[in-house]
Image (cartoon, rainbow, N blue to C red):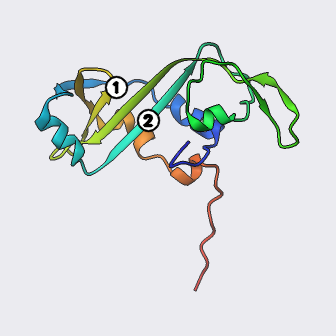
Amino acid sequence: TIQGKKADTATVDKMLDKLDRVNITDVEGQAKDASLAKRLASAEKHWTVSLALADKDLPATTPKATKQDEADKDSNASETATDKQGDQAATPTPNISERIVLEIYSRPGHKYDLLLNKKGDPYVVVVSKYTLDKLTDADTGKLLGEKPQEKKEK
C-alpha cells in the first residue's frame, strides 16, 4: 500500500527491481541515541518502507488481498483470497517468512546523503541518495496505477 491505497503490484515490482544495492558510506550513530532520534524526528523528509518477504516465489498474478493483509496482522496463516462474486481463487495467500521495515530520512546539511535504519538494527547508517532515488523519487500516482491526467489548455 502507498498512503493507505493499494499499489499497482507490477509497477512497484519494476521499481524495486531497479534498486540494485544500497551502499553504506558511514555510520551516523546508534538508533537509541537521544540526540540522533531528535534529528530524525525533525528531518525534512521521511519515508517508511515495509517489505514482506514470501517464503517462496509468488505466482505471476498476485492473489487479491485478504482481510488479513488489509489489517496487516499475523500473515503466517495461509488463507485463500476471494473474488468479487465470493468464489475462492485458486492461489492461496503466500506465507510471509520475514517483514523488513526501513526508515529513510533526509540528512540535514547533506545534499547527497540519506539516513537509513532497518527496524530492530542498533545503528543508523549514511547512504548515498542516488542508491535510493528510484524509491524516494517515485511517482506515487504511477505506483498506484493512476492514469496521468491530461492538462487542459486555457
Amino acid type assigned to the residue bearing label 2 in the image: Val
Q: Secondary structure at mark 1?
A: strand
Q: Report the number of numbered marks.
A: 2
Earlier sequence position, callout 2 versus callout 1: 2
Bin the neighbour count of mark 1 within 10 Å (Cα to Cα): few under 14, some 14-19, many 20 and up: some
The answer to which of 10 and 7 lies nearer the viewer is: 7
Q: Residue at x 56, y 42 (%)?
A: 1
Position of residue 150 relative to residue 11, above or below, is: below
Write down the quadrant of residue 40 in the picture.
top left
Q: Position of residue 36 (x, y in %)?
A: 15, 36
On screen, residue 111 versus residue 147, left or right, reads left
Q: Secondary structure at mark 2?
A: strand
Amino acid type assigned to the residue bearing label 1 in the image: Lys
Q: Residue at x 29, y 31 (%)?
A: 116
Q: Residue at x 34, y 35 (%)?
A: 103
Q: Position of residue 5 (x, y in %)?
A: 58, 49
Q: CA distance from mark 2 to mark 1?
A: 10 Å
Position of residue 53 relative to residue 154, above or below, is: above
Q: Which residue is mark 1?
A: 118
Q: Which residue is mark 2?
A: 49
